Image (cartoon, grey):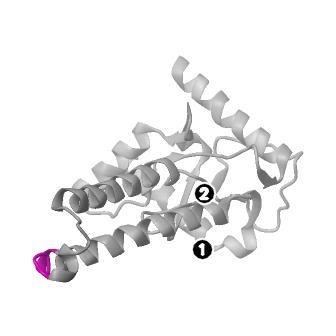
Amino acid sequence: MSSLTRFVQSIGIRRNFSTGVPETSRLIYASNNSGLVKLIKLFSVSTLGISSAATPAVMYFWDSPAVQATELSGYMFLGALAASTCSTGALHFMLSPYVHTIQLHSPPRKTVTAADTITPNSVITLETLDMFARKRETTLALRDLVPNPGMFSTWKVSKKVLNRQFELERVKGIPPTIHQDKFWLDQRDARGDGPVMANLIRVVEEHDRRQRLI
């Protein structure tokens, strides 16, 4: 069986997990700052949208007495628009990896407890927000994640998985299923199942160390 075939099958398994969320998943992590992060993203995108929409009208009526009375120079106006664009881009870069919730999937009729063993094959769904503060869910196995410690990052999707996804799209035209490749856990202020999360983080780190030795 080729690596591409195995990867397609794994994607199919993950899609089945995602469609059975109400019966086979459990919330193990939820950020208490989720609402604040969403509000910041919405405000940033809204102000950029208003600025962009107003730009053509302001430029069209630039020579009118009403606009000239504001004593606003063209450089100031364009500078404000550029600053709004840069701030929105910076916020998206920092907050797009922010994880709002994590669902741990398990086989039907099996209850997940802190005593259960989390393995590299365990499947989770991470909820983040896209550019426009819309919910984005990424479902993958723990073996697909590698530690990526940083100020705004905890995990990232392994390059091997991303490369396989790219090859599937290029060769077979299969749309990518992973649109978010970095994840940031705000562990200082979160609720959920602490023992399970600690075990999950440990499994990701240990699996990465083993892979480096191979």
Which residue is at a point 27% across and 77% down the rendered structure image?
53
Please name the amino acid that badge 2 sits on.
Leu
Residue 204 against residue 20 in the figure, above or below: above
> Dividing the picture into quarters, in which one does residue 21 lie?
bottom right
Secondary structure type for disc 1: helix
Residue 33: x %, y % from top left: 69, 58
Q: Is residue 15 left or right of residue 45?
A: right
Identify the magenta region.
59-64
Secondary structure type for disc 2: strand
Residue 197: x %, y % from top left: 77, 45
Which residue is at a point 50% across and 55% down the rendered structure image?
10
* Residue that badge 1 annotates: 19
Residue 117: x %, y % from top left: 80, 43
* Residue that badge 2 annotates: 126
Q: Is residue 105 left or right of residue 132?
A: right
Which residue is at a point 33% across and 54% down the rendered structure image?
83
> Dividing the picture into quarters, in which one does residue 206 lie?
top right
Q: Is residue 142 magenta?
A: no
Q: Is residue 98 left or right of residue 159?
A: right
